[in-house]
Image: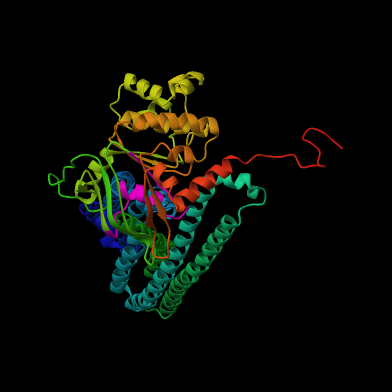
Amino acid sequence: MWKMLLRLVDARQMRVLTAWFVTSAVLQGVTLALMIPFLRALYSGSGVGPWLAVVVVLGVVTLVVDTTAMYRSYRVSVYEVCDTMIDRVAEHVLTLPLGWFTPAREAAVVNATSKEVNTLSHLASIVIPNLCNAFIVPLVMLVATAFVEWPLALIMALTIIPLLLIWRLMGTATTRANELEDTASAAAAGRLVEFARLQPVLRATGVTRTGWEPVRTTLEEDSRATLTGLRVKGRPGQLFNLVVNVSFALVLALGMSRVSGHRLDVVAYLAIMAVTARMLLPLTKAALFASEADNAKVALSSMSSLLDAQPLPDPAPGTEARPEGTGITLSGVSFSYDPGRPVLADVSLSAPQGRVTALVGPSGAGKSTVLRLAARFWDVDGGAVTIGGADVRTLGATQVMALTSMVFQDVYLFDTTIRENLRIARPEATDAELAEAARRARLDRVISALPHGWDTNVGPGGLSLSGGERQRVSIARAFVKDAPVLLLDEITSALDGENESAITEVVRELSRGRTVLVVAHRLSTVRQADEVVFLEPGPDGARVAQRGTPQELAETPGPFRDFVEASQDSSRWQLVHAPGQPRPGTSR
């Protein structure tokens, strides 16, 4: 655990802090040990002054050292752990590819910046000082007792062996319990994130009236894991405290026996018992802080696994390739998210510069995957993806992101104003440029109807706007960024006819002069494309089944013509009143 901690927190700060707490614990032990001769002198009535002076001076020094150590520990907890570690997680996450972000990993980031950081903040200010006091103070007292009455010190020393064994058992049990709880907690967090995202679907299907079974099951498993963890951690802790108290009882009994046999004076016995009783509290609390220490170990492991996540390899600064144009080409691309489940198999296609290329095919054909590979959310397993003739792996993530604008079906807006949501695309954009982008995206009509215009807050996720309005904000972002490559993923599939027509018109304008790769399910979108690539899934991954202009493919027997015919048939569907049934608004 110590190595992991020094890797995440400033090593020098932690070593200095630990040294302060060890010094404080030793001084506490020595001060308590000197209470034995002080009490002897006090009750005998001779020579109490020097011992009192020494005890008072050591007590003051101990207070100063302990106060300094605690002050430093709070600084480490706040600045080195909470502040610095959250910054490190944030900075590292920004370097990770977008494909890395799954619901489980998003939950891990949330846990890391809240629960795990909170747990680690206790390490410097609570766990380390209490463990130092729990073990170093009794050890100093054991040595001091050996000079006064070695049989009592022997019992204390013999207690160390079972305590060490129980401590190791407690560590193993706590680690197992914490890992179980952490796994269950992460699963519950991921499921709750999913539950929040799926609210529209769940409410539409009426599931929320009875509860969603996956959430209920996950929360029950989390509760069971917590109860099991408490039982697993509680038993060794109880045994540890039992041994401590039995040891104290034996010291008490043996001391009384030696007093009765006139082998130990009463004053020394009372002084030893008073000081030994003072050791009981930190020792019995050690079991509690052992659990906290192991919580910190689990938190460190989780934090380390997050910070160990590797970004996609980028070329060294200054060695990035320079694309010649913005045409996108996939050459023999194979890709799978999980081993043994291929998504794309030897896919080759091109999206020429300045033209619109539509990706069409059934669900699961890897259309959205092609877009994400073009934006380098992931790296391909085989083959290459190029922009302007340069492999995206040689361009570097920053340059790929600068070249591309992405508009997806599910638009997420930040809980701020429309102005700031647009400025995310290019922070230095002027108000005039934002207004021009809004006009071209037909967003200006929406803004003029809002109560506070540009300064209207769109709410969490943009929920105060309709789906079509959110889509226009997303398209306006693309206008603001003005990137030469445009990736569109089913942006009209969930819109009504009016919004679809408006968005299609806007996208036509946005596409001018850009390299456009669009995933489309609507025939109206496909007809606007210069070229269509039809992807067909297969057991070994999707492949290119057809390629050509929309007109050519519509006249050629094959899956695209089937798609066109099916789309035309569905557009002719209409509701017909069934004979013998009452019309809406009437009664029998």
Q: Is residue 424 above or below residue 212?
A: above
Q: How many marks?
A: 0
Q: Considering depth in this image, is 123 or 143 the residue closer to the camera?
A: 123
Q: Is residue 316 above or below residue 584?
A: below
Question: Residue at left 45%, top 55%?
Answer: 364
Question: Residue at left 30%, top 59%?
Answer: 25
Q: Position of residue 169 (x, y in %)?
A: 41, 74
Which residue is at the far bottom? 261
One can see residue 150 in this view: yes
Question: Residue at left 49%, top 48%?
Answer: 563
For residue 9, side relative to residue 208 (left or right): left
Q: Is residue 149 above or below residue 375?
A: below
Q: Position of residue 284 (x, y in %)?
A: 44, 65
497 inside magenta stretch = no
Question: Residue at left 16%, top 46%?
Answer: 320
One can see residue 42 in this view: no
Magenta-highlighted residues:
356-382
For residue 112, side relative to residue 18 (left or right): right
Q: How is the image coloured?
A: rainbow
Quadrant in the picture for residue 303: bottom left
The N terminus - image quarter: bottom left
The C terminus - image quarter: top right
Quadrant in the picture for residue 505: top left
Q: Is residue 424 above or below residue 567?
A: above
Q: Position of residue 197 (x, y in %)?
A: 51, 46
Q: Position of residue 479 (x, y in %)?
A: 34, 29
Q: Considering depth in this image, is 421 or 284 the residue closer to the camera?
A: 421
380 inside magenta stretch = yes
Which residue is at the far left? 318
Q: Considering depth in this image, is 106 or 443 the residue closer to the camera?
A: 443
